[in-house]
């Protein structure tokens, strides 16, 4: 089945440690996105990538880094510089063409807790 | 500055009745709008969308209305079912670049928790 996988589902880290969240898609989509969800704030865009080896900052990129070495993969690193890293992180992808250009498909999310 | 707002954090409806979820936006450049449904600890799933050239789009029990002059859209669910209980997000998209090399970024509202009582 085609889809987006995020692993792990739950992740716990100590403050000061970097942590990398995995996102893989087999939908052959060109564009991939990272969001975080906090209670009462909806989804906020962290980074996005339209093609391999290219990515842009979203609205809240500070303290995060990404890479896009393969079309299928878009890992997100939460660095120790991120002030409030505890959140629910969502990865998404989309593909060009027709009316569905805007529609983004989401993975199941990773709940990161930093103590 | 919140460009997409869902001012009702929650909505409670009786099974079989209509659910109306509202969304307002401020950026007149948005040209495509989407509604997503999300269950706890899961990713959002696409529900329905509407282009700015239309004022209504229907898909089964779900209808989205767009009022461009008021910068307002709404999602109607008729009849509401207990399985519709979830968080609903509206999202708006910037148009892709004219060269077609950029995809529309989505800006999401805060979400509305819909509870449908049996």
Image: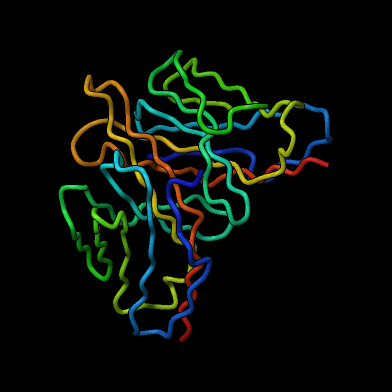
Q: How is the image coloured?
A: rainbow
- The relative height of residue B26 versus residue B64 in the rendered view (above or below) is above
Q: Position of residue A51 (x, y in %)?
A: 38, 19
Residue drawn at point x = 83 percent, y = 28 percent: A16
- The relative height of residue B114 versus residue A14 in the rendered view (above or below) is below
Q: Nearer the viewer, residue B12 or A112?
A: B12
Q: Nearer the viewer, residue A60 or A91?
A: A60
Q: Nearer the viewer, residue B7 or A70?
A: B7
Residue lying at the far front in this picture: please name it: B69
Residue drawn at point x = 45 percent, y = 43 percent: A106
- The relative height of residue B71 versus residue A70 in the rendered view (above or below) is below
Residue drawn at point x = 46 percent, y = 52 percent: B109
Q: Position of residue A56 (x, y in %)?
A: 47, 21
Q: Position of residue A18 (x, y in %)?
A: 75, 26
Describe residue B77's horizontal placement relative to residue A15 as left or right: left
State the count of labels.
0
Describe residue A6's horizontal placement relative to residue A101 as left or right: right
Residue drawn at point x = 44 percent, y = 24 percent: A49
Q: Position of residue A79 (x, y in %)?
A: 72, 26
Describe residue B102's horizontal placement relative to residue B13 as left or right: left
- The relative height of residue B41 versus residue A36 in the rendered view (above or below) is below
Q: Nearer the viewer, residue A57 or A95?
A: A57
């Amino acid at each position: 089945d085609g889809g987006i996988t995020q692993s792990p589902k739950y992740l716990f880290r100590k403050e000061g440690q970097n942590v990398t969240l995995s996102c893989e898609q087999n939908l052959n989509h060109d564009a991939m996105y990272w969001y975080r969800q906090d209670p009462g704030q909806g989804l906020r865009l962290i980074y996005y990538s339209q093609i391999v080896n290219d990515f842009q900052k979203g609205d809240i990129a500070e303290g995060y880094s990404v890479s896009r070495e393969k079309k299928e993969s878009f890992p997100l690193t939460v660095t120790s510089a991120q002030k409030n890293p505890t959140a629910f992180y969502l990865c998404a992808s989309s593909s060009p063409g027709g009316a569905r250009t805007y529609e983004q498909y989401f993975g199941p999310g990773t709940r990161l807790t930093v103590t | 500055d919140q460009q997409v707002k869902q001012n009702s954090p929650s909505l409670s409806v009786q099974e079989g009745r209509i659910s109306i979820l509202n969304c307002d936006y401020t950026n007149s450049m948005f040209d495509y709008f989407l509604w997503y449904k999300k269950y706890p600890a899961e990713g959002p799933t696409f529900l329905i969308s509407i282009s700015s050239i239309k004022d209504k789009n229907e898909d089964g029990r779900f209808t989205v209305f767009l009022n461009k002059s008021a910068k307002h859209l709404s999602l109607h669910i008729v009849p509401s079912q207990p399985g519709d209980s979830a968080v609903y997000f509206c999202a708006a998209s910037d148009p892709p670049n004219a060269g077609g090399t950029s995809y529309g970024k989505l800006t999401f509202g805060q979400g509305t928790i819909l509870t449908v009582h049996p």
